[in-house]
Image: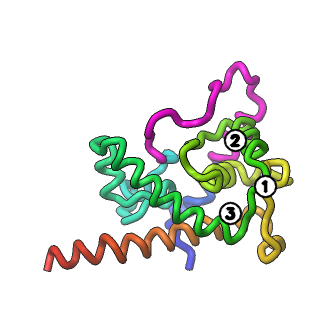
Amino acid sequence: MRVCRTIGGCLLPQIIGKVASISCALAAILPATQRSPANSMSGVKTPCIGICSTTSFGDAVCRGCKRYAFEVIGWNSYDAVAKQAVLHRIEKLICQILENKLRIFSVPNLQAGLEQFAVQYDPTLSPYCWLHNLLKKCHRDITNLAEYGAYVLPEYQQLPLAQLCELLDTEILLLTQAHHERYYAAGLERDAG
C-alpha cells in the first residue's frame, strides 16, 4: 500500500525528494565558512521537515516528521520533557525499521556525511535516526553508502537506494500509524462513546 496524495498531478514524495536533493547538492558545494559550524540540534527543536501532511491534508500522522497531528499542533506548548518523549517514541520506531535493513559501522563517517550535506541531527538520538535524516534528504546524492559509515543488509542489497529509502519511509509511516491507532485513536473513540 502506498501512502501518498497528488498535488496537481505531482506526487508529494517526489516534490519533497527534489527539494531535498537540491538542498543537499547546494550544501555539498557551499564553502565550510558558509555552513553552520555544527549541524547538531541544540535544545529540543521541532523534527519538522517543512511540509506537514497533518495541517495540509488532515493526516493523523505527519508523513514527514512522524509526529501525531495533536503533537504538531501543541508542540510549542510542550515542555522539554514532553518534546523528548515524542522524539524518543519516534526514535524507537525508526530504529526498529532501519536496524532490520541497514548497519552503521562508523559513526564518525556518518557524522562527516551529515556535516558534508548540512543535514541537522539530534546527538541525543540514535545514529540510526541520523542515518534516516541523511537518507531522507540526500539519498539521490549518495552513490556509496559505505562512505557514510553504513551498509545495506544482504536481504535488501538488490534494491536501488531510492527504492530502499521509499520502503523505509513507508514502513516507518505504517508502524507510526499503527501505534497511533492502537494507543491514541482507540482512546479517543472510547472517550467520545
Q: Quadrant of residue 97?
A: bottom right
- The 10 Å Cα crowd at callout 1, few under 14, some 14 to 19, many 20 or more, is few
Q: Secondary structure at mark 2?
A: helix
**Residue 91 among magenta residues:** no
Q: Which mark is residue 57?
A: none
Query: Marks 2 and 1, Cα distance to the nearest angstrom?
Result: 15 Å
Front position among marks 1 and 3: 1
In the rendering, at what x and y percent does residue 171 appear? 58, 72
Q: Residue at 65% across / 65% down in the picture?
A: 98
**Considering the image in quadrants, where does the N terminus appear?**
bottom right
Q: Residue at 75% across / 53% down in the picture?
A: 140
Relative vertical location of residue 108 with respect to residue 11 in this rendering, above or below: above
Mark 2 and 1 residues: CB-CB less than 8 Å, in contact? no
- The 10 Å Cα crowd at callout 3, few under 14, some 14 to 19, many 20 or more, is some
Query: Which residue type does callout 2 highlight?
Result: Leu
Query: Which residue type does callout 3 highlight?
Result: Cys
Q: Nearer the viewer, residue 35 or 127?
A: 127
Front position among marks 2 and 3: 2
Q: Earlier in the sequence, mark 2 or mark 3?
A: 2
Relative vertical location of residue 118 with respect to residue 6 in this rendering, above or below: above
What residue is pinned by disc 2?
114
Query: Which residue type does callout 1 highlight?
Result: Phe
What residue is pinned by disc 3?
165
Q: Secondary structure at mark 3?
A: helix
Q: Nearer the viewer, residue 129 or 73?
A: 129
Residue 84 in view of the camera:
yes
What residue is pinned by disc 1?
105
Mark 1 and 3 residues: CB-CB less than 8 Å, in contact? no
Q: Earlier in the sequence, mark 1 or mark 3?
A: 1
Q: Is residue 172 left or right of residue 156?
A: left
Q: Residue at 64% across / 56% down in the picture?
A: 128
Question: Which residues, given as a range, are shown in magenta?
Answer: 19-47
